[in-house]
Amino acid sequence: MPKWLNWSVFYELTEIYTAPLNVMWFILGAAIVQYHVHTVDWINVGLCLAVVFIFDLAVNVADNYYDYLHAHDREDYAQKTNPIGRLHLPAKGVFWLAWVLYAVAAIPGIVLVMRTGWSVAVFGVVGYLIGIFYTAGPHPINATPVSAAVVALAIAFGIQLTCVYVSIYGQQPLSWSIVGTTFLLCMPLTLIFFTVQLANDTSDRDEDIANHRYTLAVILLPVMWRGMRPFFAIQDKRKTFMAMVKSASLFFIAYPVLFALGTWL
């Protein structure tokens, strides 16, 4: 283990303190499987949990690395906010830590595919692509308006659907009815997770602008607020209410379009 990588550094880079929340996604996934087929393949679900638990650590490390690498604000964000600059960590070392964790996460994934079939690997590949390109590449997902929707769908619905699939594999096909029911059962989680992501993007708005990350909070919400501000000053049906409706309509139009793009593209 390199000298710079101690527990406190690993704790901050991986944000492992949030990882236990992953267990809750799988509790819900297992409950949905029980609801559908009245049985749960706990070994397959456990392997999924191991993949997601380790993969989540890898994604967090990669996020810190690529956010540091792509930062346009080199003085404040890169050196004072990002843990690589703030803790004086070797960027290349952090990069390799992320990829080692990605590789370790693939081990239980390979075992799971061997226990089921190659169709299960599709779920894993999609998850890996979302996780890696959330911050990697010239146009990372976290710098786009669809980032909140993509993350919410992947975590609050995709994980549960994977739980369902690996449990029913070999017993019955994954029908649109099962997918639809799973989606409806996960919708409260998905909407709340989307709200949390939007709140996170809103909190990071100034930082995102400085680093050229154009999330939904940077594009849309300030425009809506400017149109809504008169209503909060004077609640008048004729004078200010229609301006409120027009501003809200921006979200009513943009959200379905962006959500659809994030889902199908």
Image: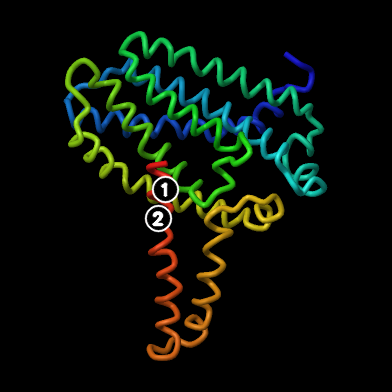
Residue 183 at x, y percent in the picture: 28, 41
Label 2 belongs to which residue? Answer: 257
Looking at the rendered image, the quarter that the N terminus falls into is: top right
Q: Is residue 127 above or below residue 221?
A: above
Element marked by disc 1: helix
The local crowd at label 2, few if under 14, some if 14 to 19, many if 20 or more residues have their Cα within 10 Å, is few
Q: Amino acid at mark 1?
A: Leu
Q: Is residue 106 above or below residue 162?
A: above
CA separation, marks 2 and 1? 6 Å
Residue 101 at x, y percent in the picture: 58, 20
Element marked by disc 2: helix
Q: Is residue 93 left or right of residue 54?
A: right
Tell me if label 2 and label 1 are in contact, CB under 8 Å. Answer: yes
Residue 222 at x, y percent in the picture: 56, 67
- The answer to which image quadrant residue 176 occupies is top left
Q: Amino acid at mark 2?
A: Val
The local crowd at label 1, few if under 14, some if 14 to 19, many if 20 or more residues have their Cα within 10 Å, is few
Label 1 belongs to which residue? Answer: 261
